[in-house]
Amino acid sequence: MDPVVLDDLLTGLTAKAFARELPSGRELLAVLTTDDDDLLEVVTAASRVRRRFFGRRVKLNYLVNMKSGLCPEDCSYCSQRLGSNAEIMKYSWIGADEATEQARRAIDAGAKRVCLVASGRGRGDRDIERVAETVASIKNGAPAVEVCVCLGLLKDGQAERLREAGADAYNHNLNTSAENYADICSTHTFDERIATVTNAKTAGLSPCSGAIFGMGESNDDIVDVALALRELEPDSVPVNFLIPFAGTPLGERWDLTPQHCLRILAMFRFVFPDVEVRLAGGREIHLRSLQPLALHVANSMFLGDYLTSEGQAGDDDRAMIVDSGFVIEGADEPTLPAHRHDLVIARRRGVGSTAPANT
Ligand code: SF4
């Protein structure tokens, strides 16, 4: 890109981010189509925004997989989907004690948020009770830890029950653009996903919703899903890169370069300047040796293993954070800047979930 045009683009995006203004789709697309030669300028601009709202802190999150495999849905990217031949562990519900023990070890290793995840379209009320018991058990041993629950589509009353048990957040990703959604899943819709995130938020849970890239989507799709996510006003946004599992329809896809992953992350930082942007699944295999650069853009990451695949060892993650000049966020430090943190508290107290625009 012409250096003057690039400078204008990044100066404009940084100013909008500092003011928490929404960039235009055209500006976001321009970030995604910058040359590899321009990568460091793009990362530098996004890192200024990251430092403004999050300093040098990195929040660590840990996944507890409560039920693995055997899902009736057909999400193409997922190793747990209907008919998947991926070689993963399949098991039905670990108990509250085992989940609490896994959470305790993760908290001791620096995790500030524990995410309880179970495969499936959604859960019946008996399973919600099982997870509610686990949430209460984890919070009992570690009241300061944030517990996020990810159980698929929510039915009436389920978000309220999880909130009552002490859950802080609910994760449900949009994954890709509305236009692309039918290409990756036929058993549920984009609108159902939107409804679940909205229900969780209305019940006082902190909404966590992100996407997966590298599934054949266009740059326009990437911009569209980022803007759709912004409309939901999530508090945290996981950015996943496809882990192509053999035995799934996307098992052969390797579309991403480390440079494009960084452009995607930078674009998300401009859309979500003061929201937790989390490095999630696939960071090791797609960013590879550029992971430390990603920390200059994202302020949060998963520690260790993912749902059905091994991640980088926790010690290596912590060394990478320290070597790159960042610090692990403490349990008593709010992740979000004060204006956003206040909204999370207000939502939990039932003051209402409608946030004024750009706050
Ligand atoms: S993403 Fe969730 S709903 Fe979709 S196949 Fe995997 S476990 Fe099932």
Image (cartoon, helix red, strand yellow):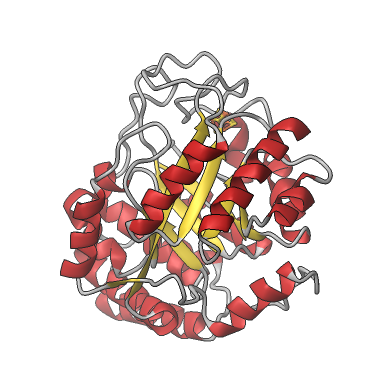
Q: Nearer the viewer, residue 221 or 235?
A: 235
Q: Is residue 311 above or below residue 40?
A: above
Q: Is residue 123 above or below residue 191?
A: above
Residue at far right of view: 156
Task: List x then y, in percent, for residue 35.
Answer: 26, 60
Task: List x then y, in percent, for residue 285.
Answer: 25, 41
Total number of numbered labels?
0
Residue drawn at point x = 21 percent, y = 53 percent? 315
Residue drawn at point x = 42 percent, y = 55 percent? 61
Quadrant housing the N terminus: bottom left
Task: List x then y, in percent, for residue 247.
Answer: 39, 17
Left or right position of 107 against 140: left
Left or right position of 244 against 159: left
Residue 124 in view (yes/no): no
Q: Indicate the quadrant of ligand 1 in the picture.
A: top right
Quadrant housing the C terminus: bottom right
Residue drawn at point x = 74 percent, y = 41 percent? 154
Residue drawn at point x = 24 percent, y = 45 percent? 312
Which image quadrant is residue 357 in? bottom right
Q: Nearer the viewer, residue 238 or 333?
A: 333
Task: List x then y, in percent, for residue 300.
Answer: 40, 63
Q: Nearer the viewer, residue 37 or 164?
A: 164
Residue 68 in view (yes/no): yes
